[in-house]
Image (tube, rainbow, N blue to C red):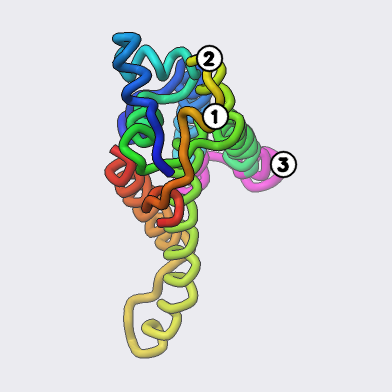
Amino acid sequence: MKNRLKVLRAERDWTQAHLARELDVSRQTVNAIETGKYDPSLPLAFSIAALFEQSIEEIFSPEQSNSNRR
Amino acid sequence: MLTAICGDMPERDRRNLNLANVWMLIWLACFGGATWLINGGLIAEGVVGWVVAALPTVVAIGAILAYGRYLREADELQRKIQLQALALGFGVGLFFGFGYRLFERLGAPTASISDASVVIAFFYFVGLWLGRRKYA
């Protein structure tokens, strides 16, 4: 699954650590999502969408990747 | 030690994991103390001996509950890494336990259940390291 998390974070000039604190997850989780190594759960995806005030579809797109199927 | 392996984490996870680590340290102290007392013949057999022998097991329940709480409340990626590490540790330990019996029949040194525990712990930490590397 592709996502625009890195772009959205960069637009706000946030660090991964800052975003991780906002979402109450580890920085490693933010990094893994941004690099496509990990697809977030639905609750976390909703939290991300709410934080950036966008819909989930605007942030995440269902393009095939290696992430959670490994 | 677990904190070092799991890397950065939310304050909630750090607190829960530290609590589980404290329980583990208490268990180690109780187990070591009970072993020393019993092996050294410093306590008489009977009720006192049974209480001393049971103490590490009672403390272990606290450690298991603390670790379970950490897992339930952990950041979702850390939970996934922990699950994969537990699967590796438990799986290797289980199959080592059964598989090594065949080698024993062929003359290999007899292994005890504590040897399997070491294998489980070793591969659990290998699993944590692999998971951390995979999602780095």
Of labels 2 and 3, the one closer to you: 2
Chain letter for mark 1, please: A
In the image, taking residue B87 as reference, residue A46 lies left or right, namely: right
Query: Can residue B85 be seen in the rendering of this structure?
Result: no
Q: Which residues are magenta?
A: B34-53
Q: Is residue A5 above or below residue B88?
A: above
**In the drawing, what numbered circle is on residue B84?**
none
Q: Secondary structure at mark 3?
A: helix
Same-chain status of marks 1 and 2: yes
Q: Amino acid at mark 1?
A: Ile
* Chain at tag 2: A
Rounded to the nearest whole Å, what is the CA distance between mark 1 and mark 3?
Answer: 62 Å
Measured as percent of width and height from the top left, residue B56 is found at 57, 39
Q: CA distance from mark 2 to mark 3?
A: 64 Å
Q: What's the residue type where badge 2 is placed?
A: Glu
Residue B112: x, y in percent?
45, 66
Furthest residue toward bottom: B106
Q: Nearer the viewer, residue B90 or A29?
A: A29
- Check the residue under mark 3 and report the chain it is in: B
Compared with A25, B96 (above or below) is: below
Residue tagged 1: A56
Q: In this figure, which residue is indicated by the disc labeled 2?
A: A53
**Does B124 appear above or below A31?**
below
**For residue B10, what is the image quadrant?**
top left
In the image, is residue B6 part of the stretch drawn in magenta? no
Assess disc 1: are there few (<14), some (14-19) or many (≥20) residues with their C-alpha within 10 Å of its C-alpha. Answer: some
Q: Secondary structure at mark 1?
A: helix
Q: Quick one: SS at disc 2?
A: loop
Q: Write down the residue under mark 3.
A: B47
